[in-house]
Amino acid sequence: MNRALTQVATRLRQKPEAVTAAEIIPAIRSTSDANGFAKYIIDIIDPREQVRVAELILGLVPENEAAAVALGFALLDLQEHERAMEVALRAKRLFPNSKKVLEMVLQVYSPYNYFDFNQALATRLREVDAHTARGAMYLARLYALKGNRPRALAALAEAEAALTAKFERNRIAMTRRDVEEGGDVLKSWP
């Protein structure tokens, strides 16, 4: 991020409601600035402010992946599911190979009974992000929710084979326990 945008970001962290579009817009001078700022806002401000700032960024750079993901997750946090679905589908059209977008779309659509759609997304995530277990984990949970225990366990075995981090091993163990014991697989949803 450039110096002006870093100053805006610092003010945004201290008092988000005081930062206006008139300050943010001129400070974003490039797509790189917009990306960096969008990633920054995800961690520092509440969901309402994330929505406001992400929409400003998308107004300047409509095809900004980081802002679309931030907006989708913020809308989900605010329980604005219909808007989150719209944002998720638009982001999926613009960034069909983005693992962040695919995960955001899966999160938005996971509470709904769109099994085929979610299965296709999880399969795509597994292809795009083969070095982690995320896609296989989503598939395992989807199969478990559908009552297909053998496929859920097979997907968990695939996830275990793709392990790269300890937290993923723990998440897989929790999901395996839920599948085997008939527990609530959504509580360990990524």
Image (cartoon, rainbow, N blue to C red):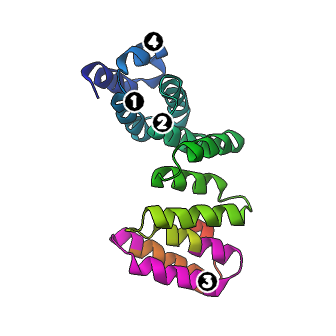
Instruction: Tell me if 190 is positioned left or right of 34 in this view.
Output: right
Q: Can you give x and y, in whole percent of width and height, for residue 107 in the image?
A: 59, 55
Mark 4 lies on residue: 22
**Residue type highlighted by circle 2:** Ala
Mark 1 lies on residue: 34
**Residue type highlighted by circle 1:** Ala
Q: Which residues are magenta?
A: 140-168
**Residue type highlighted by circle 4:** Ala
Mark 2 lies on residue: 67
Is mark 1 in CB contact (under 8 Å) with mark 2? yes
At 48% from the left and 53% from the top, the residue drawn is 97
Mark 4 residue crowding within 10 angstroms, few (<14) / some (14–19) / many (20+)? few
**Residue type highlighted by circle 3:** Arg
Query: Measured along the vertical axis of the image, is residue 118 above or below residue 161?
Result: above
Mark 3 lies on residue: 151
Q: Can you give x and y, in whole percent of width and height, for residue 139 in the image?
A: 58, 71
Query: Measured along the vertical axis of the image, is residue 130 above or below residue 13?
Result: below
Mark 3 residue crowding within 10 angstroms, few (<14) / some (14–19) / many (20+)? some
- Which of the two labelled residues, at mark 1 and mark 2, occupies the earlier sequence position? 1
- Observer-side mark, 3 or 4, equals 3
